[in-house]
């Protein structure tokens, strides 16, 4: 699927005017709107390097976001929201930290209206095939399909784990809950569509409506080798697979 993106530069944002261009990191302020120039809340804005999400933000009710990226390298940013075509843009080094980036997301054409595909597990193609294979053969994980997520009717992804042995929930700073496993002080390592999110909290980066499947490993046992992370220190691993790859 081709990515559609319109980028405009507006007047300097006063909130960022005090930052030095020589700082180790730079903040990119932006707003995400639809083709009618209405704000798009809840859009996911990501900077990706290799298989790692370096920085992540979600747009507020007014469509605005602030993303902190490395100063020394160009930033590749992807923006996505259910019902819209994913957008991508490369932010060059000469991009001023005081410029506001406007990203216009194109709506998914009516002919491509979202549908749920019902098929036997063995016929599931693409990114969910390995999920179902592990669900059948790997007893160390706890697996949540799209159907089980829907049937649970929870507002936060974390609430699906409330009855999982070894998992505790505590109120989050902004909303939702903080997930901890096996008494660890650190958050479990979260992978979103195969991209690593160090230090991310489950409810900050996912919503039940957006998730096709979730795998939960409360220890290092059973974690697929490609998702092993030494920095995790045994605090658990959560694999998330979104509905739109």
Image (spheres, rainbow, N blue to C red):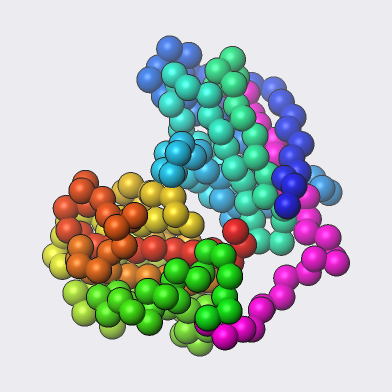
Residue 160 or residue 142, whichever sits in front: 142
Question: Quick check: 122 above or below 186?
Answer: below
Q: Residue at x 76, y 36 (%)?
A: 6
| Residue 108 forms part of the magenta stretch | yes
**Front in this rendered view, residue 72 or 99:** 72
> Does residue 54 show up?
yes
Residue positioned 37% across, 74% down in the render: 134
For residue 220, which quarter of the picture? Answer: bottom left
Q: Specify whether 106 is left or right of 140.
A: right
In the figure, 198 relative to 15: above or below? below
Q: Which residues are magenta?
A: 98-121
Q: Is residue 52 above or below residue 100?
A: below
Residue positioned 56% across, 33% down in the render: 76
Report the predominant secondary structure element of the magenta stretch.
loop
Horizontal and vertical percent position of residue 78:
59, 42
Estimate the x, y position of residue 34 in percent, counting from the top left. Answer: 76, 49
Q: Residue furthest left?
A: 183
Q: Give 148 or 105, whichever is nearer the viewer.
A: 148
């Amino acid at each position: 699927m081709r990515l559609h993106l319109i980028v405009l530069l507006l007047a300097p944002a006063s909130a960022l005017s005090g930052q030095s261009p020589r700082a180790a990191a730079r903040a990119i302020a932006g707003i995400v709107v639809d083709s009618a120039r209405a704000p798009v809340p809840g859009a996911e804005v990501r900077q990706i390097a290799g298989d790692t999400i370096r920085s992540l933000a979600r747009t507020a009710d007014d469509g605005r976001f602030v993303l902190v990226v490395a100063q020394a390298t160009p930033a590749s940013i992807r923006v996505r929201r259910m019902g819209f075509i994913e957008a991508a843009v490369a932010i060059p080094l000469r991009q001023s930290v005081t410029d506001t980036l406007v990203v216009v997301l194109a709506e998914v054409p009516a002919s491509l209206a979202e549908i749920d595909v019902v098929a036997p597990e063995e016929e599931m193609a693409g990114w969910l095939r390995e999920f179902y294979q592990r669900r059948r053969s790997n007893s160390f994980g706890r697996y949540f399909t799209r159907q089980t997520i829907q049937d649970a009717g929870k507002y936060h992804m974390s609430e699906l784990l409330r009855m999982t042995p070894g998992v505790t929930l505590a109120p989050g700073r902004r909303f939702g809950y903080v997930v901890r496993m096996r008494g660890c002080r650190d958050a479990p390592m979260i992978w979103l569509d195969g991209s690593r999110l160090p230090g991310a909290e489950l409810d900050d980066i996912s919503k039940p409506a957006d998730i096709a499947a979730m795998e939960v490993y409360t220890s290092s046992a059973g974690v697929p080798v490609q998702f092993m992370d030494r920095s995790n220190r045994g605090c658990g691993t959560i694999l998330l697979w979104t509905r739109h790859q």
